[in-house]
Amino acid sequence: MILVFLGAFFPVIGATVAGLVAVLVALVAKGGFAALLTLAAVLLVQQIEGNLLYPVIVGRRVRLHPAVTLLSFAIGASAAGVLGALVAVPLAATIGSAIKLPVEESTLPEADRVQP
């Protein structure tokens, strides 16, 4: 449980390493069938968390569409590995905010606009 908690702080590799340890413990303690069931459970949880929950929850917090969140995470991870995965979504949110700000400000009445 502690290993899974600590692994959650490292995108991509943390959950994989924690899942591998869980499978190995099941293999040693209960045998091959239990290890296969554990592997199936670990993969199912990782897929649901990574492809469904993460984009929706993080996307709401940074005000990005879930597809943009997932795509930016995938691009960051493939381009720069773990470090890219860590900074991809915040970078996408920053770029999105920088694009939205001038558009939103241009629709404000003249009296409400920020003067440089």
Image (tube, rainbow, N blue to C red):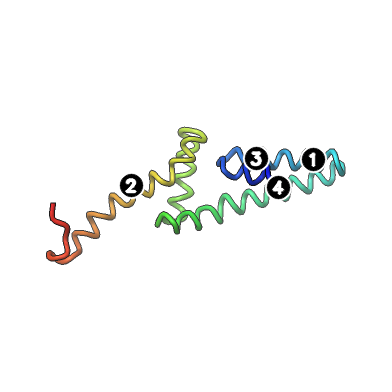
Instruction: Report how far apart the C-alphas of labels 4 and 3 lie in the structure.
Output: 14 Å
- Residue visible at 49% across and 42% down in the picture: 74
Q: Nearer the viewer, mark 1 or mark 4?
A: 4
Q: Secondary structure at mark 2?
A: helix
Q: Nearer the viewer, mark 2 or mark 4?
A: 4
Percent coordinates x, y for residue 76 in the rendering: 45, 39
Q: Is residue 6 left or right of residue 77?
A: right
Determine which quarter of the picture holds residue 39.
top right
Percent coordinates x, y for residue 45 in the rendering: 66, 52
Tell me the tag on residue 95.
2
Residue marked by disc 1: 25
Residue type highlighted by circle 1: Val
Labels 1 and 3: the sequence-earlier one: 3
Residue marked by disc 3: 16
Labels 1 and 2: the sequence-earlier one: 1
Residue type highlighted by circle 2: Ile
- Residue visible at 63% across and 48% down in the picture: 46
Q: Nearer the viewer, residue 100 or 5?
A: 5
Residue marked by disc 4: 1
Residue type highlighted by circle 3: Thr
Instruction: Report how far apart the C-alphas of labels 3 and 2 lie in the structure.
Output: 30 Å
Residue type highlighted by circle 4: Met
